[in-house]
Image: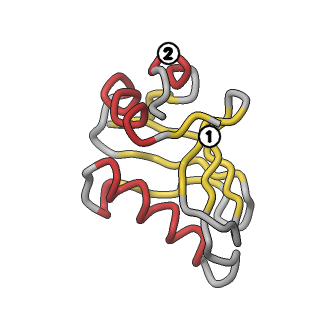
């Protein structure tokens, strides 16, 4: 079920020439999905938190589902933490909110 864009507006902020989102990663899950849970973006991945595999899964999910090139998505904070800040290049916050609303599931 798609999420109301209004619920996502406070989770997307301007950053450099694009936008930044904060995502909590839950590795070794039984699904791969980006979910809005209690005003927080949560990414479920079946990858383990080893050797950057969960991070790679998050980045791959975002660029594929948002229709971006891999170079446009980068983790800028939290490489070794479950809480990540992800920079989306060249996508203004308003546009990112619309794109996220299409791919984020309501919990």
Rendered residue at 58%/78% (across/down): 53
Residue in the foreground of this view, choosing between 66 and 22: 66
State the image quarter where residue 36 is shown.
Answer: top right
The residue lying furthest to the bottom in this view is: 51
**Lower sequence index among marks 1 and 2:** 2
- Disc tally is 2
The disc at residue 104 is none
Rendered residue at 69%/36% (across/down): 37
- Give the alpha-carbon distance from disc 1 to disc 2, as whole Å: 14 Å
Q: Is residue 33 above or below residue 99?
A: below
Q: Which residue is mark 2?
A: 6
Rendered residue at 70%/75% (across/down): 49
Does the CB distance between marks 1 and 2 fall below 8 Å? Answer: no
Judged from the image, the secondary structure of the residue bearing numbered disc 1 is strand
State the image quarter where residue 51 is shown.
Answer: bottom right
The disc at residue 41 is 1
Q: Give x and y (percent) for residue 66.
A: 32, 47
Q: Is residue 28 above or below residue 59?
A: below
Q: Give x and y (percent) for residue 56.
A: 50, 71
How many other residues sit within 10 Å of disc 2, few (<14), some (14-19) or many (≥20)?
few
Q: Give x and y (percent) for residue 81.
A: 74, 61
The residue lying furthest to the front in this view is: 1
Residue in the foreground of this view, choosing between 69 and 1: 1
Judged from the image, the secondary structure of the residue bearing numbered disc 2 is helix
Query: From the viewer's perspective, is 38 left or right of 51?
Result: right
Q: Give x and y (percent) for residue 55.
A: 57, 67
Q: Is residue 45 above or below residue 6?
A: below
């Amino acid at each position: 079920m798609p999420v109301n864009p209004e619920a996502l507006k406070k989770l997307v902020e301007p950053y450099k020439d694009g936008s930044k989102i904060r995502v909590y990663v839950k590795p070794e899950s039984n699904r791969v999905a980006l979910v809005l849970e209690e005003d927080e973006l949560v990414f479920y991945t079946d990858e383990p938190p080893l050797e950057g595999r969960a991070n790679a899964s998050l980045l791959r999910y975002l660029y594929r589902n948002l229709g971006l090139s891999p170079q446009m998505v980068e983790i800028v904070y939290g490489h070794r933490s479950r809480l990540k800040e992800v920079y989306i290049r060249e996508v203004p916050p308003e546009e990112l909110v619309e794109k996220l609303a299409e791919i984020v599931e309501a919990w």
